[in-house]
Image (spheres, rainbow, N blue to C red):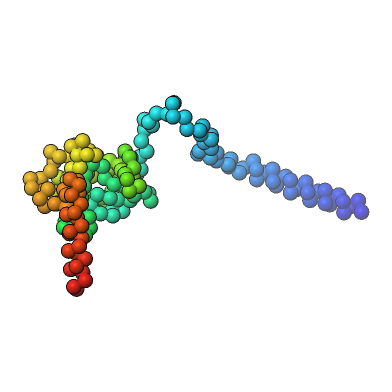
Amino acid sequence: MAIVIGGLFIRNARKEARRAVRRAFKPAEPKPLYRPTPKPAPFNEKTAREALEKPVLRGTAYVVDGDTLTIAKTQIRLFGVDAPELNHPYGKKAKWALVKLCKGQSIRAEVTDVDTHGRTVARCYLPDGRDLSAEMVKQGLAIDWAKFSGGAYRSMELPDVRQKLWLADARQKGRMQVWETFEAKQNARKERE
């Protein structure tokens, strides 16, 4: 019996020695790259102030239309401009122009606000620093929306672009009956087909 117990003792001692050797040569576990954030204090209106830094998103863009794209599963509206909707004149052309600008590029989106439709509004930049809103206006496929941009892109507009993008111009001026008439004509045309 003593021999059996002695054998078990020696076997366990060998296992422990092997484990000790493995632990000695095993690389240390990496520490997590983040720290758990403490629970935020409840909102206090008296001490609240606007955040100084706005979030920045980076990545490949999926283009939705001429003034909307998606980066990292976040739908983003280009800051300060209005492009035609896909079913409006020049809508598809605007979308494909934005696709051409963004294709193969990592877009940097500096979030400025959230619009009434729940979309994130951001100033979007190409890696070389060009502003996507400005590029779309320069191509004549978007117009400045002074209500939101403060007129930042108005000087870049091509001559007569507001006649070309008359539906976007009508929306900015609050003439939604123009949109409704256009939509009704489109629906009637589809029904005839």
Instruction: Please name the residue shown 36% across and 36% down the image.
Output: 54
Q: Residue furthest bottom?
A: 193
Q: Quadrant of residue 23?
A: top right
Instruction: Please name the residue shown 74% across and 49% down the image.
Output: 15
Q: Nearer the viewer, residue 95 or 44?
A: 44
Q: Relative to 71, say whether 40 is above or below.
A: above
Q: Residue furthest right?
A: 1
Q: Quadrant of the N terminus?
A: bottom right
Instruction: Say if residue 14 shows up in the picture.
Output: yes
Instruction: Please name the residue shown 18% across and 68% down the image.
Output: 189
Residue 160 point in image, percent of width and height: 8, 47
Side (left or right) of 98 relative to 49? left
Residue 103 point in image, percent of width and height: 26, 52
Instruction: Say if residue 128 shows up in the picture.
Output: no
Q: Residue furthest front?
A: 177
Q: Quadrant of the C terminus?
A: bottom left
Side (left or right) of 165 relative to 32? left
Side (left or right) of 50 relative to 4? left
Q: Nearer the viewer, residue 121 or 8?
A: 121
Q: Residue furthest top?
A: 47
